[in-house]
Image (tube, helix red, strand yellow):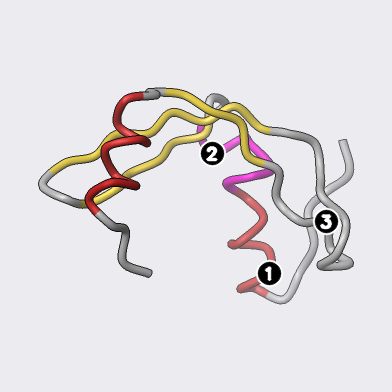
Amino acid sequence: MAWSNDELRKIADTDDRHVSPFRPDGKTYGTPTWIWSVVVDGDLYVRAYNGRQSRWYQRPWAKRRGGSLPRA
């Protein structure tokens, strides 16, 4: 996905936000996760507040491996 310059500017103006990844059913939103974002040379980078321990970070990896996340 390509971000427009206006979208990147709006994101850059707010350095932290909350995102809610979908639960395994793919329809229900999960618990909001606090993330930080930065725009560098037109590219968007994000990091979950809890780093690699964040479910938001782990979800794509679990899905890619065909597994699920451990329950908290």
Number of numbered discs = 3
Q: Is residue 40 above or below residue 49?
A: below
Read off the residue under disc 1: 63
Circles 3, 1 touching at the beta carbon (< 8 Å): no
Three-letter amino acid code at the position of disc 3: Arg
Circles 1, 2 touching at the beta carbon (< 8 Å): no
Residue at far left of view: 41
Measured Cα–Cα span from mark 3 to mark 2: 18 Å
Q: Is residue 1 above or below residue 19?
A: below
Q: Residues within 10 Å of mark 2 (few under 14, many from 20)?
A: few
Magenta run includes residue 43? no
Three-letter amino acid code at the position of disc 2: Arg
Three-letter amino acid code at the position of disc 1: Lys
Q: State which quarter of the image contains the C terminus.
A: top right
Read off the residue under disc 2: 52
Q: Residues within 10 Å of mark 3 (few under 14, many from 20)?
A: few
SS under mark 2: helix
Circles 3, 2 touching at the beta carbon (< 8 Å): no
Q: Is residue 72 above or below residue 67?
A: above
**Residue found 67% across the figure and 63% down from its top:** 62
SS under mark 1: helix
Rendered location of residue 53, percent (x, y): 61, 35
Q: Tell me the quarter of the picture where residue 13 sits.
A: top left
Q: State which quarter of the image contains the N terminus.
A: bottom left
Left or right, residue 47 beside residue 43: right
- Return the mark for residue 23: 3
Q: Write the start and end of the magenta stretch as one range.
A: 51-57
Rendered location of residue 70, percent (x, y): 83, 48
Between 56 and 65, the one nearer to me in the picture:
56
SS under mark 3: loop
Residue at far front of view: 6
